[in-house]
Image: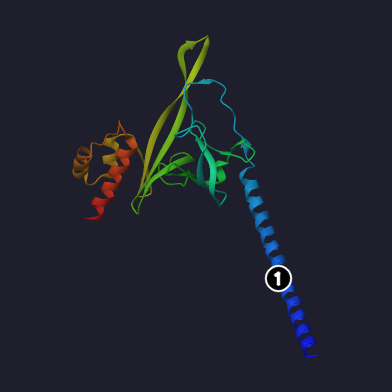
């Protein structure tokens, strides 16, 4: 009789354990279902843009940032961060293109594009903020930020026609234009040369000229490197005042 009682107790315990496991499995399944629906919803927003319009002309080069092939990057879209998406940046139209799972080229809406990161660059969408001499809305590379300065780079590719006829057809090419903006004291300054950079920074000009010469920096040869290194050096000199 004692053995029967022990056996019944064990059976009851096993049944309760199974019920508890089934309940846990049910809760786990519901959790996965909610997460799946949330992910599906955010993916649907990401891939709901318009298709990229093709460039029909015969091109000698491409309109994209760095390369025309897609690269894995990180982006924030409508407040949601996507850590790994196939991206490419069209500099002629200032459009961020993503490759959908169905291999469609989708143009993201700049108005809800927060930022994206490719080739170790952080690119953000600048909305006019009402500050003096604010540049036009668009995607800008953030090169440097501190309490005193914010340095941005604007890249644009413009299409031109090659005047050399090739089998009675014209070819076209893209030419890159680079403009830098330095945000200082709630005013944007356009940087287009070594002279305008030093004028905008105002202080430590003598030290900065020595720094430029010592490091063989040239605006014409490598404007991005020159501007960035000089701004960083100015920041360093200002901290030691």
Residue found 38% across the figure and 49% down from its top = 186
Residue 85 image position (x, y, % from top left): 55, 44
Residue found 42% across the figure and 42% down from its top = 141
Residue found 32% across the figure and 35% down from its top = 223
As drawn, the residue found furthest toward the bottom would be 2
Dot 1: what SS?
A: helix
Q: Is residue 134 above or below residue 193?
A: below
Badge 1 is on which residue?
Answer: 21
Residue 118 image position (x, y, % from top left): 46, 42
Q: Is residue 205 above or below residue 8?
A: above
Label 1 crowd (10 A; few <14 / some 14-19 / many >=20) = few
Asked whether, in this view, residue 159 is left or right of residue 102, the answer is left
Residue 40 image position (x, y, % from top left): 66, 50
Name the quadrant containing residue 153: top left
Q: How many discs mark residues in the rendered view?
A: 1
Asked whether, in this view, residue 115 is left or right of residue 38, the answer is left
Q: Is residue 177 above or below residue 232?
A: above
**Front-lying residue, 146 or 73:** 73
**Quadrant of image for the N terminus:** bottom right
**Quadrant of image for the C terminus:** bottom left
**Front-lying residue, 236 or 214:** 214
Name the quadrant containing residue 225: top left
Residue 167 image position (x, y, % from top left): 52, 9
**Colour scheme shown:** rainbow
Asked whether, in this view, residue 110 is left or right of residue 228, the answer is right
**Front-lying residue, 180 or 202:** 180
């Amino acid at each position: 009789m004692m053995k029967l009682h022990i056996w019944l107790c064990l059976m009851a315990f096993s049944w309760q354990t199974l019920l508890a496991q089934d309940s846990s499995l049910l809760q786990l399944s519901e959790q996965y279902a909610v997460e799946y629906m949330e992910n599906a919803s955010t993916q649907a927003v990401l891939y709901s843009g318009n298709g990229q319009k093709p460039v029909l002309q015969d091109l000698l080069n491409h309109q994209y940032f760095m390369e025309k092939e897609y690269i894995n990057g990180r982006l924030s879209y409508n407040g949601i961060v996507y850590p790994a998406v196939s991206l490419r940046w069209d500099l002629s139209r200032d459009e961020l293109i993503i490759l959908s799972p169905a291999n469609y080229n989708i143009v993201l809406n700049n108005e809800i594009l927060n930022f994206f990161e490719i080739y170790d660059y952080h690119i953000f969408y600048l909305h006019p903020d009402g500050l003096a001499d604010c540049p036009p809305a668009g995607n800008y590379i953030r090169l440097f930020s501190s309490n005193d300065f914010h340095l941005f780079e604007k890249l644009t590719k413009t299409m031109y026609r090659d005047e050399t006829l090739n089998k009675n057809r014209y070819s076209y090419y893209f030419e890159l234009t680079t403009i830098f903006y330095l945000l200082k004291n709630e005013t944007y300054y356009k940087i287009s040369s070594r002279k305008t950079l030093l004028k905008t920074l105002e202080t430590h000009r003598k030290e900065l000229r020595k720094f430029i010469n010592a490091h063989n920096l040239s605006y014409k040869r490598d404007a991005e490197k020159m501007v960035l290194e000089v701004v960083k050096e100015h920041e360093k000199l200002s901290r030691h005042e």
